[in-house]
Image: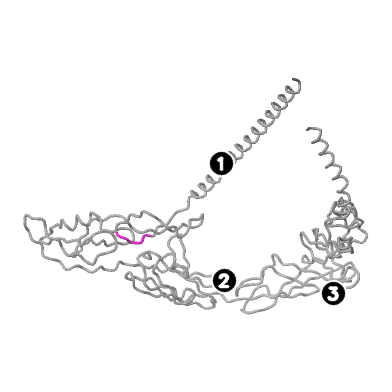
Amino acid sequence: MKRKVLKTFWILVLIAIMILPPLRAANAAGFNYYTSIWIYKYPDKMTYTVGESFDKTGMRIFGNRTKADGSTDKCELGIGGLTFKPATFTKAGKNIKVTITLNCMAASGKMEPFSLDLYVNVDEMEGDPPLYWTKKITAEAKKTVYLVGDSFDKSGMKVWAHSEGDYPPEAAKWNCTKYVKNVSPTTFTKAGEQYVTVTAHLTTEHSSADFTAKIKVKVYNKIEITKHPGSEIVEEGDACNFTVKANHADQFTWYFVKGKSSVAAKEAGDFFPGLKVSGASEKKLKLSNIPLSLDGWSVRCDFSNKAQTVSSDTAKITVYEKEAPVATEVPAVISSEAPAETPTAAAVPETTPDKAAEASANPTANNGHTHTFDGVYRHNSTEHWLECSCGERTAVAKHVVAEWKTLSNPTKSSVGIRRGICAVCGAEVLESVPYDGYETENENDSMSLLLIIGLSLFGVAFLGCILAIILLIARNRRSKKRAHARHSS
């Protein structure tokens, strides 16, 4: 039986040896071709000066080749026909791209271009510009927007001397900022688009000359605020307007501010539910359906043009609670029996707490007046209470919020804002959240925990693989021992 198996195996091996070479030859293209090229060694020179040409000296390029018999290898290519772009560097900078191209035989049977990119650094021209070839100068400034009364900022300004002709290379330029002798005007006295004239004095051993260039700038008038917004006191649900005026302002942007918190007026509806805002980018800001949660906040308008941003004074908003309708009272009957129930005002959606029922059922006499509490909570931004028609309050307590919703997260520069609903009176409560780095620490702790769990799982899996390999080796050894024992017997 064993001999038959071995005989069959060797027959299959011989058949494979006979069939594979013809199949391999059938799949071969019949010629050598390249599938890709790559840089084995970069050129010796990787830093240039404006005006210099790319130097391929020292560069070595290899290609991935497929031979006629279908085998593959890597071989070095000659770079005599190598082309590159740009051939001459005309501007300075870091990581200037150079595209090199080499024609090689492709799988199509034709010579095709294969391209690669490499990056070099190009420095500005060094030394004094040759006056003989200098035809003009150009200048540019980092800052081109100013206010009336500002002085021209020469920091970041660059001035170049340009040459023309075959030598130095065409379009070559030298940095001649150090030769600037005059800038006019130095201070801007009027608004509008204008030009700054830069004069550079270039000199050599035998001659000298002045060259001028112009820099285009835009000058704006300073913003003058003529009317700041005024504070407003409104009843909950009412409306109010804030108006500002300013000269030379192109844009108006309103904000709600409180402490370090700031909310753009155009997004205020997300922070103050029910509030309606119009004119968020106009001179007049209109608010309607003002909620109690806006109490204590202020408004501010930012005026801006392309050169300046100025803020108005803040105007405080005071919102007082809207008076709830007072229920008609029924005269109290003094008897030994429990007091009769007092009709209450319109029912509210919130569940009335036990304290409200207790206060309503146990009115307190004061100077002949029997306090009657209707069980409906009044509230402001921080507290709620039950109130008699005479103004007497009872069950005064801070708002109780079971669940908060974060409106904005705190940062190192500003506090956050969260919103909740009081579980007792149903009032909307806004609260600032100071930044203390706690969330960040929690995030870091979570990431650390995940990392530990991941490493632990990896370790368990790795140990499991090692154990499986050991068991497999031991099993094979036992099998060999049994086979050897049977053969010996």
Q: Quadrant of residue 52?
A: bottom right
Residue 473, percent across and down? 69, 30
Residue at mark 3: 135
Q: Main secondary structure of the magenta part?
A: loop
Q: Is residue 187 magenta?
A: no
Between 169 and 273, the one nearer to me in the picture: 273
Vertical position of residue 215 compared to residue 75: above or below: below
Spatial CA span between label 3 and label 2: 39 Å
Whether residue 120 appears in this view of the structure is no
Q: Which residues are magenta?
A: 425-429
Vertical position of residue 321 compared to residue 12: above or below: below
Residue at mark 1: 453
Q: Amino acid at mark 1?
A: Ile
Spatial CA span between label 1 and label 3: 70 Å
Residue at mark 2: 308
Mark 2, secondary structure of its residue? loop
Between 153 and 392, the one nearer to me in the picture: 392
Q: Specify few, some or many for label 1: CA neighbours under 10 Å numbering under 14, 14-19, or 20 or more.
A: few
Quadrant position of the C terminus in the picture: top right
Spatial CA span between label 2 and label 1: 53 Å
| Front: mark 1 or 3 | 1
The mark that comes first in sequence, 1 or 3, is: 3
Vertical position of residue 137 compared to residue 422: above or below: below
The furthest residue to the left: 335
Q: Is residue 428 magenta?
A: yes
Mark 3, secondary structure of its residue? strand
